[in-house]
Amino acid sequence: MPATTAHHLRRIATNGVQLNVAISGNGPAVLLLHGFPHTWQLWSGIMGRLAGQSRVIAPDLRGFGASERAIDGYDAGTLAADAEGLLDALGEPSAAVVGIDAGAVPAVLLALRRPGLVRRLVVMEALLGRLPGAEHVVAGGAPWWFGFHAVPGLAETVLAGNEAPYIDWFLHSGTLGRGVPDDIRAAFVHAYTGSEALRCAFSYYRALPTSAQQIQDAAATARLTMPTMAVGSHPVGTGLERQLRPIADDLAGHHLQDCGHIIPLDRPDTLFTLLDPFLSADLPK
């Protein structure tokens, strides 16, 4: 069962925005970066257990959850700079960085641009722009919602007033029909209700071409020199691992069977059994 280590919420200024950040535990820093349609509460099933030997830092990304609804800055480079500034504001010289979905691309970009800042890297269920290796995942085209979300102003106008069933569709499909706890579901729906909240969320998709170019440029001149783990489930599978293999010096890959896209909520125990030894491997015993 998950540990019950208490967390506290802080409002922290970084890179021109105010982020809502959940912090728990003491020790070497572990930075957790969520995706869509999540908030920091995505990590509720593992955060307490990780906090047994780490200082766990879980922000709501720029524009998401209770963080500031920024006008722009939803490309991976700016999100990576947000993460870097957050660690600096908290006095952390380095961290293990864990990212999923929308949080995975800035995690990789941060590791490529600032390798001394990222002690270990874990990324899950995302694709890194146009890097080779994942062509099989998108052979039939990008998922339908990518195009819908990418059109400026459209999705937030259409969905305003109907946010709950839309978010529920992602939560249901992302856990292969098992669903998420009622309190987490309610928190996610609340976080994505209102046209401004939706605009911020969809701005991430509208910045994907910029983010893809940033990743391509960084990977052309830098490598992932820290121990790295790629975790796939459904639908990305081994796609992310295959993209990382040519640019990572030390890569472990895991493909979880019978697990939906939202790994931290669908299979928190399995995820923790992977993260715990990996994140603690170089810590003092």
Image (tube, rainbow, N blue to C red):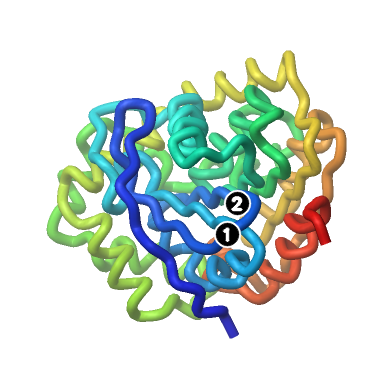
Quadrant location of the N terminus?
bottom right
At which x and y percent is residue 223?
A: 77, 25
Q: Residue furthest bottom?
A: 1
* Residue 53 picture quarter: bottom right
The residue positioned 86% from the left and 34% from the top of the image is 249
- Amino acid under label 2? Val
Q: Note whether residue 190 is visible.
A: yes
* Residue 119 picture quarter: top right
Q: Residue furthest left?
A: 161
Q: Note whether residue 208 is visible.
A: no
Give the CA separation, mark 2 to mark 1: 10 Å
At which x and y percent is residue 66?
A: 27, 52
In this rendered view, identify the residue nearer to me: 237 or 122.
122
Is the residue 263 above or below the residue 67 in the image?
below
In this rendered view, identify the residue nearer to me: 117 or 101.
117
Q: Is residue 45 left or right of residue 197?
A: right
The residue positioned 30% from the left and 33% from the top of the image is 17
Label 1 sits on residue? 26
In this rendered view, identify the residue nearer to me: 59 or 129.
59
Is the residue 225 above or below the residue 43 in the image?
above
- Amino acid under label 1? Asn
Quadrant location of the C terminus?
bottom right
In this rendered view, identify the residue nearer to me: 105 or 11.
11
Secondary structure, mark 2, is strand
At which x and y percent is residue 49?
A: 61, 72
Q: Nearer the viewer, mark 2 or mark 1?
A: 1
Label 2 sits on residue? 30
The residue positioned 60% from the left and 30% from the top of the image is 110
Secondary structure, mark 1, is loop
At which x and y percent is residue 275?
A: 71, 61
